[in-house]
Amino acid sequence: MMKTSDLTEKYDITRQTLNNWIQEGLLERPQKNEHNAWIWDDSLINVVEHLSQFKSVPKDQVDTFTINNRRYLGSKFKVLDFIDKVVKENTENVNTVADIFAGTGVVADLFNSQGKEVIVNDILYSNYVSYLTWFGNELVDYQKVTNLIQYLNELEGFAGYVTENYGDRYFSLDNAMKIDAIREEIDVIENINEREKSFLLTSLFYAADKVANTVGHYDAYRKRMDSYTPIYLRVPELNFNKDNLIFKEDANELVKHIKADLVYIDTPYNSRGYANAYHVLESLIEWNKPKVRGVAKKPVDLSDKRSLYNGVKAPEAFSDLINSIDAKYILVSYNNMAKKGNSRSNAKISNEEIIEILEKKGKLEIFHTNHQPFSTGKSQIDNHKELLYLCKVK
């Protein structure tokens, strides 16, 4: 047992810091004694000791960014309120949420910010690295990370893999050379843990995406270079997490080995494979420097990142996925593209197929909201809706 004054002195923290941790849900409020003073038991002292190692710096001293500060096909950022409302009003006792096709991770972040444990998964390595940043449990020396990102911003560029393959295409020559210098330097920085390195990599690929000469994906670059803004790395905002799980696996295999109160599903329903759409960022973060081909400079071999959900076997894969899930609730996102857009953007699983598969798993409710979709080409999409299928498992 320990008094507050002794606790703050031992761990070099203030009473306000303790209050902040309690308000943020990171620390339970201690019991009071007969003198109305907080008394800290051993379990709470252990939490304080853990949190005191989690160094931070004031937000107004750091140029930061958040998880949603990137462009991504099919991002659910604009429908988060809709998802949140459906879950809060139609489920009970949801403490663990699995987001198994997580993309940017904004849906997982919604639930993580509510204090729920999250299981986050995506087949792309660049997304996996970003999850270590946003959802990782490992302690981070935030001041050290901030200093390293400032150091990376000051590096002189040089011509390397990025310049050779993507310079004057996806990036200006100056930005390509700066990216080369930063990416090579990150791999030789010592005395950082896995999550701290992920902060540096996430900072780089968010910054690279900001200055990319594209319309938001990497199927192609603009014919005329119009993105000369110098690349500038900012610091990812810091989340304190506990007991989250992060994977880079085939979702159909993953669900056979995990259990959650709610599983959220947003599969890649159309033929636009995400490995194709984000191959530049993927190569930048994996840094395996693959041989590339064609005008778009895509890696010669992307077979390990292809998904059954991009082809004719999508309904079969979806059925197998749903049958393998161990959860109280399954929540499926779907936008009703059907045959509305460019052929590459049209859904490979129909509304009817989704309903039939989910009704075999449990009691089904369907919710919808208006939402503007993404379609290749200049297709005008009318009466488009974002659907949520909520299945209460039998």
Image (tube, helix red, strand yellow):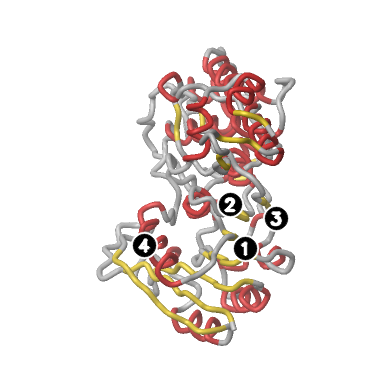
Give the mark, 4 or 1, whose residue is nearer the N terminus: 4
Q: Residue 75: x and y, percent? A: 43, 53
Give the mark, 2 or 1, whose residue is nearer the N terminus: 2
Mark number displayed over residue 275: 2
* Figure check: 256 above or below 27: below
User: At numbered mark 2, what does the secondary structure look like: helix, strand or loop?
Assistant: helix
Q: Distance between the residues labelled 4 and 1?
A: 27 Å
User: At numbered mark 1, what does the secondary structure look like: helix, strand or loop?
Assistant: loop
Badge 1 is on which residue? Answer: 307
Check disc 3 and give the amino acid type.
Answer: Asp
> Can you tell which quarter of the image residue 337 is in?
bottom left
Give the mark, 3 or 4, whose residue is nearer the N terminus: 4
Q: How far apart are marks 3 and 4 (CA)?
A: 34 Å
Judging depth in this view, the residue of 332 and 217 nearest the camera is 332
Badge 4 is on which residue? Answer: 82
Give the mark, 2 or 4, whose residue is nearer the N terminus: 4
Q: Residue 84: x and y, percent? A: 41, 60
* Quadrant (top left/top right/bottom left/bottom right) for the N terminus: top right
User: At numbered mark 4, what does the secondary structure look like: helix, strand or loop?
Assistant: helix
Check disc 1 and give the amino acid type.
Answer: Ser
Badge 3 is on which residue? Answer: 304
